[in-house]
Image (spheres, helix red, strand yellow):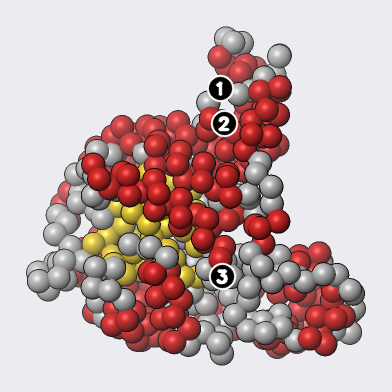
Amino acid sequence: MKKVMIMDTILRDAHQSHAATRMRTEQMLPVLSALDDIGYYSLEGWGGATFDSCMRFLNEDPWERLRTLRKYLVKTPIQMLLRGQNLLGYRNYADDLVEKVVEKSFENGIGVIRVFDALNDPRNLEASMKAIKKYGDMLKRTDPARGICEAAISYTSGPVYTLEYFVELAKTYESMGADNICVKDMANLLLPFDAYKLITALKKALRPETKVHVHTHNTTGTGDMVNLMAIQAGADIVDTALSPLANGTSQPATEALVATLQGTEYDTGIDLKKLIPIAAHFKKVAADLEMEGVLNPKVRQVDVNTLVYQVPGGMLSNLMNQLKKAGKEDKLQEVLAEVPNVRRDCGYPPLVTPSSQIVGTQAVMNVVMGERYKMVTKEMRDLFAGKYGRVPMPIDEEVAEKVLKGEKRITYRPADDLAPEYEKLKAELMEKGFYTQEEDVLSYASFPEVAETFFKWRKAQRQGVDHDLAASGTYPV
Ligand SMILES: [Mn+2]
């Protein structure tokens, strides 16, 4: 009998999707022990935008949050999301920082690291997966449920994204040492019957011990069906969120899936009754977040635009905003027709952040200017120059010439250009007087200005200045 496992996203993606990542540690604390008792595969609780949001909006040290979660989550591994060579931020980091972030994440309590690259370029996962194997394998020796390396495929649609493409990529990640392969469908582009075919193909091609983990959202309303079809095709783990922060732009609801699978060959073994009081707690949290104005109930609605236009919901609203600014709202259909052309020119990158924005902005420029590639953003040039990594198909040489204007193209791994940076950043932070732990260097590397403002606040707190004054953003230091 095959038991399906669940990762609950309530402590990370659920509130990132619904409430701008603003759930505070104190709002998690009352139910952490109860969550630990459920029998989840893992609880996603860190990485992604939580790192930025902790410091920027909540005056919390993200590392301190992780240590607190670990204190209460004794049985259930904490899962995090890592953006490959971009780590927790948005630029390419040097390999020494990649290793340090992985080492410190495990050391502070992470059990499973899900790592992905927006372009699905395996070279961009080389350094992080090597580090995850190095520190993860040490952790596994004392605790086999922790130290897990989960490599994620950024799911997208388009002519090159065939079953063969995904299977080859998954096998590459498996050969690089992945324990789990995740299909990461951040925009809910994956359709239920495609999910069935994809997961069937992956399960057939991968080693029996490699777990297949499915991550989708319910933005377009297909999320529950995607999960159910994936499970029938043999998916080992699927992602859901407890109902108060589920559905819409977040994951499908945990309770609904647990009930659906109960008594079947896919039974999760989770006791539905145990979820009720935890959900009741998060219902109050969601209401508080709505009162604060960070949760707009609209995020719970079904948005069918992605199904119609084949672009992620976030990308579509960006396109509409850009056209509105240019006073060309009537050009939406032209822009939507231009998106696949631009995508073909630059080698069919997946339509996920950041390439979705880069391609979308270019499509708008091409239409608004009335001439293709008359204007090009720096990001588009970098994409053509290979600075984000390798795209799945060859780029259009004629367009490349127009875009790059003689700029050099690189074909090697982008991070090969970067000199070690940890010691330099550490010295900088010490000189500023904010260094208290090695982890501070990693916070500072990820979001320099945000981290510095947070460190100032923290220092003011520790020196015992007036709390309200410190909280108001005034720093008498
Ligand atoms: Mn997600």
Closer mark to the observer between disc 3 and disc 2: 3
Query: Label 3 to label 1, Cα distance in Å?
Result: 36 Å
Closer mark to the observer between disc 3 and disc 1: 3
Query: Label 2 to label 1, Cα distance in Å?
Result: 7 Å
Return the residue at label 3: 121
Query: Label 3 to label 2, Cα distance in Å?
Result: 29 Å
**373 left or right of 340?**
right
CB under 8 Å between discs 2 and 1? yes
The reply to whether the residue tagged 2 has its Cβ within 8 angstroms of ligand 1 is no
| Position in image of residue 190 (x %, y %) | 44, 78
Give the amino acid at mark 1. Answer: Thr
Q: Residue at x 39, y 69 (%)?
A: 175
Return the residue at label 2: 440
Closest to the observer, 191 or 157? 157
Return the residue at label 1: 436
Q: Residue at x 64, y 34 (%)?
A: 423
Q: Which residue is drawn at 62% across and 38% down?
A: 422
Closest to the observer, 263 or 85? 85
Residue 185 versus residue 393 in the image, above or below = above
